[in-house]
Amino acid sequence: MSSDQIRDALEYHEWPRPGKLSVELTKPTATARDLSLAYSPGVAEPVRAIAEEPADAYRYTNKGNLVAVISNGTAILGLGDLGGLASKPVMEGKGVLFRHFGGVDVFDIEVDETDVDRFVDTVAAISPTFGGINLEDIAAPACFEIERRLIERCDIPVFHDDQHGTAVTVAAALLNALELQNRSLSDVRIVCVGAGAAGIATLKMLTGLGADPQKIALLDRSGVIHHGREDLSPHKRAFARDTHHRSLADAIDGADVFIGVSAPEMLTPDLLRTMADNPVVFALANPDPEILPSVAHATRDDVIVATGRSDFENQVNNVIGFPFIFRGALDVRATTITDEMKFAAVEAIRDLARLPVPGEVCQAYGGERFAFGPGYILPKPLDPRLLGAVSSAVARAAIDSGVATLPYPAHYPLESLADIRLGAPPRRNEAVAVTA
């Protein structure tokens, strides 16, 4: 960033008051009666009710619309292990996105603990406060074990967005890119560079959607992950193959898809030239991708390119997934987030990208016109239709997969994808109401 951009970023976070989130009152406090109801003696009544029936916490407290965004700061964005306190601006930022896009309230929680056992114990102990837990910026492989244990111990959704938010968004984008090229996910050869949380979760998602594991090559810092290596974690070993390929140059020759969640300039023009006809390149390293779109398009005129950046076409951004996945899960009070719910989010996102884009979305992006095609394979984050389309699909999938504890709301305040196709006007976040 330039010195001006650095100054702007720091001033944004400091003024007019430090930070990006605050707590607001939802009940009147103007009279003595108000205060007697808010605290003593009135507060005793919901306490007794919850002690007798724990589910009443959803009736009398903010639990049902409250998500914990939790990190220990061991993998902050592209900055690495800088500790829990340093992760707080990111966790606050995640809270901003939850609230703005999904109408979900957030407490950000930074845990000064890297030991897996103690971290899990800490989060599990505070989990009754929340309706869901979003894990963030926790390094692999610990993140896999942390999430697994917390899912087992908690009766609320636990979701590591670095894994599943990325996987959902990449899957939606890739399926749409392949559709444009009249190709099937099961037929393409995929090379993924980066075997951390995002890379492994993305490949699990893609195989769940039909990708052939034998046509996938996963690479880490030591090269291709193959059965002859003895340095593999269980999560990497799941994608090991019997192959003579050892380098990226070996693996990418003739490949159809490149997915990068690694480092800048990993995909050179020479390597791109060796890929199959009509390649798909997702260069998702931030802020500097594995290959710049301008370089990729100058190298080949048949390539579809996506990055993680908002200043290039086809931004692969988790914000078009996680706020709405949690919104749907909270609205039917799901006890977990299943694969079926993630698959439903994928289909809703990719389906929305195929529909005509409202003028208000184009206006939000400087008047640029968007239409489904090589330069527009995902909805824009500021598309208000995401709220209804993805949330309703996730809520339905939670019910169908048996993890919802509430029925689908009779008058769900969010429009479904079917409503969108019929031209119903999009409703705003202010219309969100949590069923208690």
Image: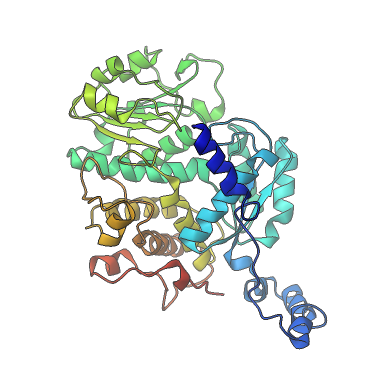
Looking at the image, the residue that sits furthest to the front is: 4
Which residue is located at x 74 percent, y 53 percent?
125
Quarter location, residue 266: top left
- The image position of residue 273, as x and y in percent, is 24, 18
Residue at horizontal 48%, vertical 36%? 198
Across and down, in percent, residue 82 comes to 66, 32
Q: Is residue 135 visible?
A: no
Q: Is residue 382 left or right of residue 134?
A: left
In this picture, residue 155 sits left or right of residue 257: right
Question: Which quadrant, please, contains the C terminus?
Answer: bottom right
Left/right placement of residue 423 relative to residue 76 reads left
Q: Residue 231 placed where, x, y %?
A: 56, 17
Residue 319 in the figure: left or right of residue 57: left
x and y percentages locating residue 421 in the rendered image: 24, 65
Colour scheme shown: rainbow
Where residue 155 sits, quadrant-wise, is bottom right
381 to 210, vertically: above or below: below
Q: Give above or below for 412 relative to 336.
A: below
